Image (cartoon, rainbow, N blue to C red):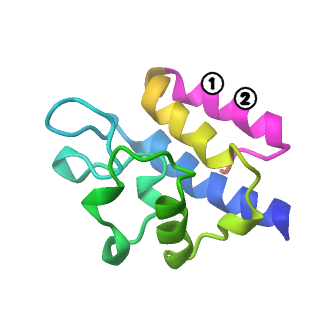
Amino acid sequence: MGRQVLQEVFNKVYKHLISAEHPSVDANGYCAYRGQDGRRCAIGCLIADEFYNSALEGLSAEAESVTKILFKSGIRVDALPTGFLDGLQRIHDSRFDERHAELSMFADSYGLSIPE
């Protein structure tokens, strides 16, 4: 069950980040769960619109407020290892231009496969 949840979350984030042309940033250029032009970051793509709240901006992907919203959005955060969400977020925030290689290394580190 746990590995399946990791793979499902990774698949969703992978597909989102690979298809994104630009990172999700706010008007000041800071990474954002919901950015300009409807963009979403690695974790923002997991948050259902009805549960998004701008108060989440600036919080870590593994902050309690964020994980509660992710759980409400259908993400089994209880099955994810510590650091999993933060790792995906770091790829968006710090390594966006290298996201293909970074996502591949991330997948390898958790024994996950790259979605087709």
The residue where tag 1 is placed is 101
Q: Which residues are magenta?
A: 98-114
Q: Secondary structure at mark 1?
A: helix
The crowding category of the residue bearing disc 2, from other C-alpha atoms within 10 Å (few below 14, some 14 to 19, many at least 20), is few
Q: Residue at x 29, y 52 (%)?
A: 34
The numbered mark at residue 4 is none
Q: Secondary structure at mark 2?
A: helix
Q: Nearer the viewer, residue 103 or 69?
A: 69
Query: On the rendered structure, is 43 left or right of 7?
Result: left
Query: On the rendered structure, is 103 left or right of 2?
Result: left
Q: Residue at x 68, y 62 (%)?
A: 8
Type of the residue with mark 2 = Met
Rendered image quadrant of residue 51 = bottom left
The residue where tag 2 is placed is 105
Q: Nearer the viewer, residue 106 or 89?
A: 89
Verify whether residue 28 appears in magenta: no
Up/down of 34 relative to 51, above or below: above
